[in-house]
Image: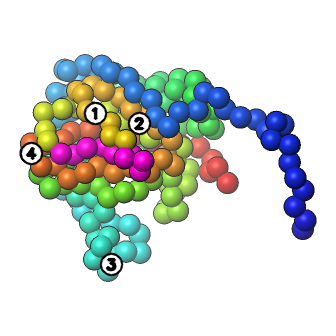
């Protein structure tokens, strides 16, 4: 098969593309406080690992976190609305729903972290993940920075929403004081490839 040069001007570009978008006050203080109570009373402690790395010391704890998975319809509706509207405005991906029809609520305690990763990857059904949606439920902690691979750090603010393409590499740095609460959902659809 021989390569044929292409005319770049004939390709469909997306001038509205963004690596991330933010919106303050997406959740009210009351909504954040209610979710924090659910996390504190119903979450389970988990050490995550990347598939096939259970015996690899470096990756034995890709994340250390307290997780509460929920299929609360009000939360799903709110996440779905903002995922759909943001997708129409910035990305135009084929998204058909929310990953596993649930939202994950997290609490990172002192020392908890999430190693660098992207949410679109080869494990299980994560190749269907298109958009990542995060809500900061508090900002009264130290450390726990949400950092993209280009070292851009998102400043936390209670109720703040951040959406980014699932291919954007990111990490959560270790929490050094207090507890970091967040809520996450992923927009999914047929894989890109």
Query: In which image quadrant can residue 40 be found?
Result: top left
Q: Residues within 10 Å of mark 2 (few under 14, many from 20)?
A: many
- Say the numbered circle drawn on residue 56: 3
**CB atoms at circles 4 and 2 under 8 Å apart?**
no
Please tell me whether mark 4 or mark 2 is closer to you in this view: 4
Residue 110 appears in the rendering: yes
**CB atoms at circles 4 and 1 under 8 Å apart?**
no
Q: Secondary structure at mark 4?
A: strand
Residue at figure coordinates x 22%, y 27% from the top left: 158
Gap between marks 2 and 1 measured at Cα? 15 Å
Residue at figure coordinates x 45%, y 29% from the top left: 21
Mark before the other along the chain sequence, 3 or 4: 3
Q: Give the side of residue 35 with respect to residue 146, left or right.
A: left
Gap between marks 3 and 4 measured at Cα? 29 Å
Residue 111: give x, y in percent of width and height: 14, 56
Residue most extreme to the bottom: 55
Q: Is residue 74 above or below residue 184?
A: above
Mark before the other along the chain sequence, 4 or 1: 1
**CB atoms at circles 3 and 4 under 8 Å apart?**
no
Q: Secondary structure at mark 1?
A: loop
Gap between marks 1 and 3 measured at Cα? 32 Å
Mark before the other along the chain sequence, 1 or 3: 3
Camera-nearest residue between 110 and 85: 110
Q: Secondary structure at mark 3?
A: loop
Residue at figure coordinates x 53%, y 33% from the top left: 18
Q: Give the side of residue 96 with respect to residue 20, left or right.
A: right
Please tell me whether mark 3 or mark 4 is closer to you in this view: 4
Q: Which stretch appears magenta?
A: 143-151
The verdict on residue 120 being magenta is no
Residue wearing tag 1: 155
């Amino acid at each position: 098969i021989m390569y044929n040069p292409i005319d770049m001007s004939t390709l469909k570009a997306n001038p509205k593309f963004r690596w991330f978008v933010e919106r303050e006050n997406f959740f009210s203080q009351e909504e954040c406080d209610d979710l924090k109570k659910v996390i504190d009373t119903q979450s389970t402690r988990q050490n995550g690992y990347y598939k096939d790395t259970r015996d690899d010391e470096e990756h034995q704890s890709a994340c250390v976190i307290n997780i509460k998975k929920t299929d609360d319809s009000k939360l799903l509706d709110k996440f779905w609305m903002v995922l759909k509207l943001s997708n129409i405005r910035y990305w135009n991906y084929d998204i058909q729903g929310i990953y596993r029809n649930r939202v994950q609520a997290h609490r990172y305690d002192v020392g908890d972290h999430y190693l660098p990763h992207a949410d679109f990857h080869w494990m299980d059904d994560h190749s269907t993940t298109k958009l990542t949606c995060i809500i900061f439920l508090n900002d009264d902690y130290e450390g726990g920075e949400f950092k993209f691979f280009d070292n851009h750090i998102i400043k936390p603010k209670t109720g703040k929403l951040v959406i980014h393409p699932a291919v954007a590499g990111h990490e959560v740095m270790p929490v050094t004081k207090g507890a970091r609460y967040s809520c996450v959902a992923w927009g999914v659809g047929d894989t890109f490839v």
